[in-house]
Image (cartoon, rainbow, N blue to C red):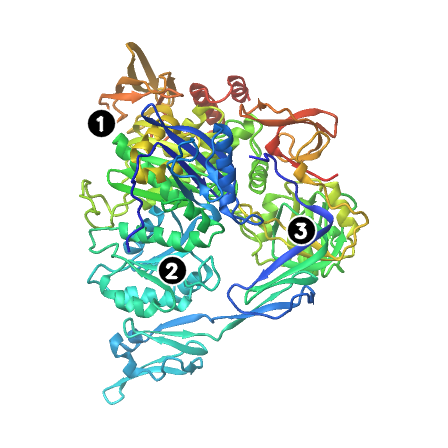
Amino acid sequence: MAHAYTPGLKVTERAMITKTRRLPILGEVLVEKGQAVSPDTIVARTNIPGNPQTVNVANILGVDPDDIADFMKKKEGDSVKKGELLAEYKSFFGLIRHHVESPIDGTIEMISTVTGQVTLREPPVPIEIDAYIEGVVEEILPREGVVVKTEGAFIQGIFGVGGEAQGVIRVAVEGPNDVLDADAVRPDDKGKILVGGSLVTAEAIKRAGQVGATGIVAGGIIDTELIEYLGFDIGVAITGHEDIPVTVIITEGFGRMRMADRTFNLLKKLDGFKASINGATQIRAGVMRPEIIVPGYEAESTDEGLDITAGLVPGTPIRIIREPYFGMLAEIVELPPELEVIESEAKVRILRARLEDGRVVTVPRANVEIIES
Amino acid sequence: MQEQKFELDREINSVLATDCGSTTTKAILIEKINGEYRLVVRGEAPTTVEAPFEDVTMGARNAIREIEELTGRRFLSDQGVITPRQPDGSGVDIYMSTSSAGGGLQMMVAGVVKTMTAESAARAALGAGAIVMDVISVDDGRKPHEKIQRIRQLRPDMILLSGGIDGGTITHVAEIGELIAAAEPKPRLGIGYKLPIIYAGNKDARKHITDILGEKTDLRIVDNLRPVLETEVLGPAREEIHNLFMEHVMAQAPGYNKLMQWTPVPIMPTPGAVGACMQTAAKEYDMSVIGVDIGGATTDVFSVFGEYFNRTVSANLGMSYSICNVLLEAGISNIMRWIPFSIDEGELRNRIRNKMIRPTTIPQTLEELIIEQSIAREALRLAFEHHKSLAVGLRGVHRQRTIGDTFEQTGSDETYIDMTELGMLIGSGGCLSHAPRRAQSAMMLIDAFQPESTTMLAVDSIFMMPQLGILSSIHPKAAMQVFDRDCLVKLGTAIAPVGPSGKAEFGAPCLEVTLTVNGQTFEESVPFGSMKVIPVPQDTTAEAVIHPTRQFDVGAGYGRELKTTVNGGVVGVIIDCRGRPIVLPEDVKTRNAKLVEWFLAMNMYPEESLKKYAEV
């Protein structure tokens, strides 16, 4: 296999970013190719068939299913209002009367003489897709959606919760090793995306929600505090659909973890800029990481981030992403080509790296990721 | 509709097979050497179903190119794999492939009664290699609108609808049909396509089902999978699932149309092929087999007992992507009970989460390895429990499936998995196949599955069961020769008595074993609560006389002697007298000391480190 290491997450001042905005079912595209869009521009729309409800008319009336047509007051395709009479059964000159009322506003879709069920459908539900980022419509996907393109700063996190949101970035701590706690959240943080250092506490997230902040970005989070915020435990790494007021993006991992300097410094430069963020994470084939996009940010340098296609070479700055050096930054010293036996007795491809304290350590190549210094 | 089957029309001396997995495409070259089929070489490359490549054949070509480089021969042309083998030595006699890329086959099943037709439908789908997203039935406890909502939320590749015996209920199966029609479900792939639905229920309801679903969906009708209460006929439904997998799922996955043209053998879903391999193995070895494949996201368990074959997928039990779900389902204390040193609970939780978000990392330290293997035990245990809950006989009736009934009737909810009957337990997947010491794989299998009596343990060394499974569908002999000689690493037989029948203390007499290997005799007396390994090499058999004390049963009855043949392996013959179920001391210190003792007996980890744990 070509690469045995985890490529670093993208942290760059300037990137071309494209986002596909697709409807769940076919519909109508509302914008044109080349059109400028803002995050809240509706780019496509469709109507999802309304919720169906079934009523077993035969059971309620106490008649055979194949007889229900005789007792129906409505036919297939008719509109009905909630409480309106659907079917009625009278006998003994009207002394015995059973009737069925519509449980919803909608239309009669099917009257089944096999089961005695009547299917009613609520009015269609309109679904709209917005552009999510500020940019230009790059491509039209007929009846499905669009591709929006923009240029700007782009930062990927390692894990997130919560969906798409927009806000103005405010770095709420002094340095990348600082904890973002409740005291760092200000009353005027409504609509802000707050940036912390090594950790965000559950109290800080709660407070951010209270003041109306839309997002939080920090190096780490404590496992149990995340569960506390969500109100449930995460089993599988598919996130983004949580019903929470504040989208949270973690850049390094679980536990207290100093945010990478490059990430923190870039976020500092982006302080005051409007960003689109998404906490959605999916760790599987087709990996999806949470993201922070600042369209239109004009980079001071032409640096587009380190080219990781060169792979690992002596001098490459790395982060170690597994015990016993988890979270430590280092620089590659040597890349022996032979497999070596490590403490766990596995024979693997390794590298030697110099930690910030000067120690040279041996680490499996699978346990490092390139960081841009 | 008949499944497109491939018939061999020529002698096969060389086979190239690929498995396009969700992350890696693996190719193997098999050739007939001195009259025997053997694995020659293997190659692998990243799968290329996702953007920016979006063409599965690129990954397949890269994996095959590795084989070209290693053999110095040519197998690829612009059109695909060169077949048959050419006079200049290029090409192979046949090429075939399995696939689980793009999320595999995802299905929903529905039936009238949860424990009858719906359960049969689930078995049909799982056996065909699908992930079952949900099982809907009239009596599943959900209100009609909740069922409709669920059907709408899920976007399966197809739905299998069953219900009613022939001549039985029409109303209830039509009711389920109406719910599906009301939900207007959409397929996962191909916006604008109609969702395929296979109807395998009461034949008298076919017209009604066609009226209800014929226009809205791509409806296929096959034989009822429960034509009478006492019989389950899963074949036709499974065949149609395979057909639709090819026609619908594969045809819409990027590059598969091209890949399908490379081979005359229909592409099989990877788990379906592994199941075929297990079934062929059980037949060839003439024994009951359980196989497990533990991956990053899911764990598949297969069992073949007599004519019964079952497969289950624990979709959210895995070692990376789903590792936090193992934590959630097993609970932290169940993971910690296998760790012989103290570790802070919060620290352990954070470590497990970090493995989830960086799934490609590997344990560097011994402690990390022990932690990972402890989690693996729990994932395997839970997956096996799930399997046992589905591997049950037909509920409430005499067991009878398509092939003659040879089983006694058991209670309706009782699994037919009988651990004392089990002949072979096969493990595969990263943590079992690539454990630094084979004894670790053996111990993970024993702790999770708790085999009883005598059971051969093995691991699939390089995970080629998918390729051998599809090969077994056209050439079982070739598949089995490679399976036995190149695929399986035999770890050795585990001897494990059931018991104690009453109260017994650790250290009480349990088992006396006499093994005769190549004229040499080993005599061992193993007390309750202890383990012992006798070194008997791979491909060597030993005559065993096993005598349990009266509180233990090794297969012949409590206190009764068993004479049998056991197999050696790279670990040896393992005598496990920890009881069934395995007894773990409640007290942490005592438990840790016992774990260290067992690990030492198995030579699982470096002795020095284990002794340090024991001192703490």
In the picture of the structure, the residue carrying the numbered disc 1 is B557
Image mark 1: chain: B
Please state the chain letter of the residue tagged with numbered disc 2 in the rendered image: B
- Tell me the residue that label 2 is attached to: B196
Name the mark nearer the viewer: 1 or 3.
Answer: 1
Residue drawn where x is 29% and y is 78% of the image:
A61
Q: Quadrant of residue B352?
A: top right
| Badge 3 amino acid | Glu
Q: Residue at x 22, y 21 (%)?
A: B561
> Mark 2: which amino acid?
Pro
Tell me the distance, in whole angstroms, between the alpha carbons under discs 1 and 2. Answer: 52 Å
Q: Earlier in the sequence, mark 1 or mark 2?
A: 2
Quadrant assignment, res B548: top left
- The answer to whether marks 1 and 3 mark residues whose Cβ atoms lie closer than 8 Å is no
Task: Write down the chain letter for disc 3.
Answer: A
Q: Residue furthest right?
A: A300
Label 2 to label 3: alpha-carbon separation = 49 Å
State the CA–CA distance, disc 1 to disc 3. 61 Å
Q: Nearer the viewer, mark 2 or mark 3?
A: 2
Picture coordinates of residue B486 (x, y %)?
39, 27
Viewer-nearest of labels 1 and 2?
2
The crowd level at tag 1 (other Cα within 10 Å; few <14, some 14-19, many 20+) is: some
- Quick one: SS at disc 3? helix
Q: Which residue is mark 3?
A: A203
